[in-house]
Image: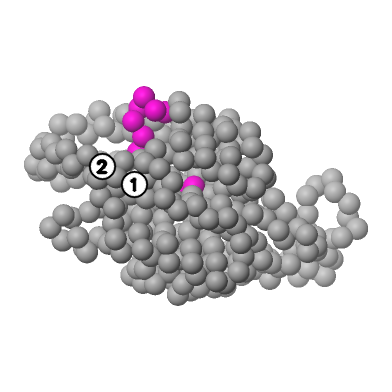
Amino acid sequence: MSEIFERQDIRALGSNLELLAQQVVEGFIVGLHRSPFHGFSVEFAEHRLYNSGESTRNIDWKVYGRTDKLFVKRFEEETNLRCQIVVDASSTMYYPWDEKQPDKFKYKNKFCFAAQSAAVLMNALKRQRDAFGLTLFDNEIQINTSAKSSTVHYRLLLSHLIQRIENPQLNRTTDLATSLHQVADAIHRRSLVVIFTDVMEQPDKAEDLFAALQHLRYAKHEVILFHVTDKSKELDFEFENRPYVFVDMESGEQIRLQPSQVKEYYVKQVTAFTEQLKLRCLQYKIDFVEADINKGFTQILQTWMVKRAKMG
């Protein structure tokens, strides 16, 4: 695809998040005219999808005539969605990483992709007049803001993300479960919680993570979990068959081996955990989305757009 929101070179804007977000969202809206979602772009902020069973009194028939889709005029109070964007800033999120050339992957690692995606969503939310907050965490919550919709607030949150892109935090562990419990308790009930994380949890902490996700749903939040990975390397373990030194980005521990020695076992373990995570998300009615950093932002925006339309 040639749309700007799919082009890889858009990510070269790096930490210029405001420009990147503006270009991606505008490109996405234009692209909707040529996609199966045609009709959303015209009514992006002023309408929501008609829900089967509700009164037909407020259906906008003029919009139906243009789009062949049923939209309901959105009332002012319906635009007050609150969204909390939760971004994992632990050290594993800075993969890929080259210790000898720290700037080589600065704008190509998982955290940068997550930060850029968060900026894109905030831009889209702002256009909708929705309120948004930001949580950054590693082994504890580092930044946690309440949800607002002003331009000043938007730029403050971008500055927090830029600071983390430009100053990677190495040797920082993660505590995803505890952070999610704290988010569930702290934010306004019935919010939309959007999580960007690589879910690099220890196997013995899996149940803690599942309990935290369940807590979010128990608190009446809608949840989207973006599983941020460098898929070819982290899920498929596609490395040349030569000796590598693998480094634990949280502990600094190193191990030297041939990828072929461990690939089968590694892929089996990672796949099993990912499938377990998907199953739990399905059970809890959480949207689980594989977010490969080597793909564009469509995977992010389409998921958000469909969820936003369902929430009204």
Identify residue for label 1. 90
Mark 1: amino acid = Ser
How far apart marks 1 and 2 lie (CA) works out to 8 Å
Q: Could you tell me which residue is drawn at 84 percent across and 45 percent down?
A: 53
Question: Which residue lies at the image location 46% right of the left edge and 59% below the top edge?
Answer: 117
Residue with the mark numbered 2? 250
Task: Tell me: 205 left or right of 250.
Answer: right
Above or below residue 40? Residue 245 is: above
Please provide the residue range marked out in magenta.
195-206
**Where does the C terminus fall, quadrant-wise?**
bottom right
- Residue 164 falls left or right of residue 285: left
Q: Amino acid at mark 2?
A: Glu
Give the mark, 1 or 2, whose residue is nearer the N terminus.
1
Toward which corner of the image does residue 233 lie, by quadrant?
Answer: top left
Question: Is 219 placed above or below 22 here?
Answer: above
- Relative to 139, is 309 above or below? below
Q: In this image, 57 relative to 204: left or right?
A: right
Are discs 1 and 2 less than 8 Å apart at CB? Answer: yes
Residue neighbourhood size for the residue with mark 2, other residues' Cα within 10 Å, grouped as few (<14), some (14–19), many (≥20): some
Q: Quadrant of residue 7?
A: bottom left
